[in-house]
Image: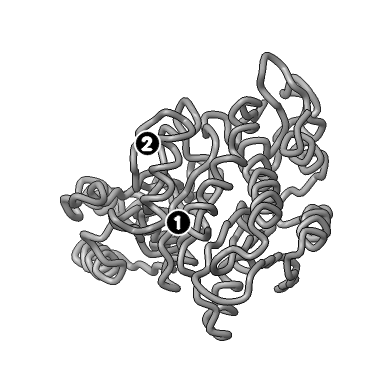
Amino acid sequence: MSAVFDLTAELIRRRSVTPEDAGCLTLLADRLGAAGFSIEHLRYGEVDNLWATHGKTGPLLMFLGHTDVVPTGPAETWHSDPFEPVVRDGLLYGRGAADMKGSVAAMVVALEQFVTAHPDHRGRVGLLLTSDEEGVAIDGVRKVAEHFRATGEQIDWCVVGEPSAKEKLGDLIRVGRRGSLSGTLTVRGVQGHVAYPEKARNPIHAVAPALTELAAEVWDKGNDDFPPTSFQISNLNAGTGANNVIPGTLTALFNFRYGTASRADDLRVRTEALLTRHGLDWQIDWQLSGEPFRTPPGGAVREAVVAVCRELCGIDPEQSTGGGTSDGRFIAPLGAEVVELGPVNATIHKVDECVSVADLEKLPSLYFAICARLLS
């Protein structure tokens, strides 16, 4: 098999369930160090991060990825060991094959090939890897971005290896992502016996009209870059487990996915005003996971990625701001243009996660071509 296949398989064998790295970063650091990259290990808390760079001055092209994976679920539901790479019908199976050990391997191989072919390339090229993307994402790229801000590290362009394609490599790229604002809502009532409701106050009954109104609210109409803001309730919890007890409190988890037509502060204010108007005894703990970002048309890395997809994949890629969030949300505020390009995302986080071997074999050539367009 090829260098990218062999490296992907080796990474899959390492049980790097978030936030564990299982030696992936040491393996990759050794390879890139041997290729002439400067290696910096950035550890925060229990999380390993790797920053590898080549070149001395000029614009910086960063490749961004993660080596951690989500849990497999019951191993017996897989058709083969999730940590033993297996090829069936042209697909490489294993946890992380698509999200995103295949992309990480492709980036490493492409960078090795690029600095060999262009040892005196223009500017700098770097690879940032973390083992804290699939988990809480506190001590990974978020902390590295703070380090870069403090040290004055300037990122000009960033290519994220998240699986972006729908059906075929190169058919969709991410040119931005929506912001994510989550809330944990606690509504307080008075616990009591269901036979004596006049002596209690049921928080489920009290909050239901407010939640209905929140779900029906038109937060904005979106714009040319992003769809309208989405509000979703993801969990409700109340009660003691007994059917004759009115609960004393209710907890609701909810999330906003929003673009540039709204601001996080405005969403907070409107939500809190609505709850107050309904006369509830409430409290919200807010968590802002990331602000929306977008690389505009004409940006150098966006144009380079589009051109490479056209030339090497024969596809004019859809240029999307949809999907969830990625670690690009921490790099974009540093002033970087961010684009995401990776394999098909149909099986990510699922049982029998897999990646097309043909797409995997092609991916290093795409990353190499992006380097060549921007740095040679």
Q: Give above or below for 222 relative to 9.
A: below
Residue sitting at x 64%, y 52%: 114
Residue shown at the point (60%, 67%) measured from the top left: 138
Q: In screen coordinates, is 193 left or right of 36?
A: left
Q: Amino acid at mark 1?
A: Thr
Q: For numbered disc 2, what is the local secondary structure? A: loop
Residue shown at the point (80%, 55%) measured from the top left: 31
Which image quarter holds the N terminus?
top right
Q: CA separation, marks 2 and 1?
A: 42 Å
Closer to the camera in the image, 101 or 267 = 101
Q: Position of residue 74 (x, y in %)?
A: 74, 31
Rendered location of residue 282, percent (x, y):
35, 67
Residue type (three-letter) at the residue carrying disc 2:
Pro
Per the rendering, the mark at residue 317 is 2
Q: Earlier in the sequence, mark 2 or mark 1?
A: 1
Q: Position of residue 262 (x, y in %)?
A: 23, 62
Residue pictured at 79% horizontal, 63% vertical: 33
Residue 163 horizontal side relative to residue 286, left or right: right
Q: Nearer the viewer, mark 2 or mark 1?
A: 2
Q: Nearer the viewer, residue 34 or 15?
A: 34
Q: How many marks?
A: 2
Callout 2: few (<14), some (14-19), or many (20+) C-alpha neighbours within 10 Å?
A: many
Q: Indicate whether 317 appears above or below 270.
A: above
Please tell me which residue lies in front, 223 or 207: 223
Find disc 1 in the rendering and name its residue: 251
